[in-house]
Amino acid sequence: MRDIVWTIIVIWLIWKIYDTFKSMSKSKTQTQGFNSKTSYQKEGEVKIEKNVNLKSHFNPNDGEYVDYEEVK
């Protein structure tokens, strides 16, 4: 009977440790700047988001094109 009680206690402790590490990993990803709109990305992936509504600082009529030749 005593062995059964100790087995249950050990299983409970292992479960609590696992749950603690699982919750720590969830909180770590939330503090790294991930939000609900961002899809999950693997480590090393690069995602480039382009904002097409940016205004140009230059007028297309400003200046002129200058052709150049590279001298070696």
Image (tube, rainbow, N blue to C red):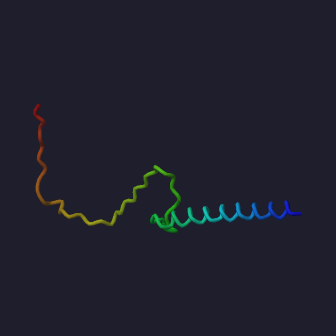
Observer-nearest residue: 54 or 7? 7
- Pick the quarter of the image with the C terminus: top left
Coordinates of residue 4 in the picture (x, y in percent)? 85, 61
- Name which residue lies at 33% across and 66% down: 53
Tell me if 54 is positioned left or right of 68 in this view: right
Count of number-bearing discs: 0
Query: With respect to residue 43, does 28 lie above or below?
Result: below
Query: With respect to residue 25, does 42 lie above or below?
Result: above
Tell me if 44 is positioned left or right of 11 in this view: left
Q: Residue at the top extreme?
A: 72
Coordinates of residue 44 in the picture (x, y in percent)? 46, 49
Coordinates of residue 59 in the picture (x, y in percent)? 17, 63
Among the 4 quarters of the image, the one containing residue 52: bottom left
- Name which residue lies at 26% across and 66% down: 55
Among the 4 quarters of the image, the one containing residue 62: bottom left
Tell me if 59 is positioned left or right of 30 in this view: left
- Pick the quarter of the image with the N terminus: bottom right
Observer-nearest residue: 10 or 30? 10
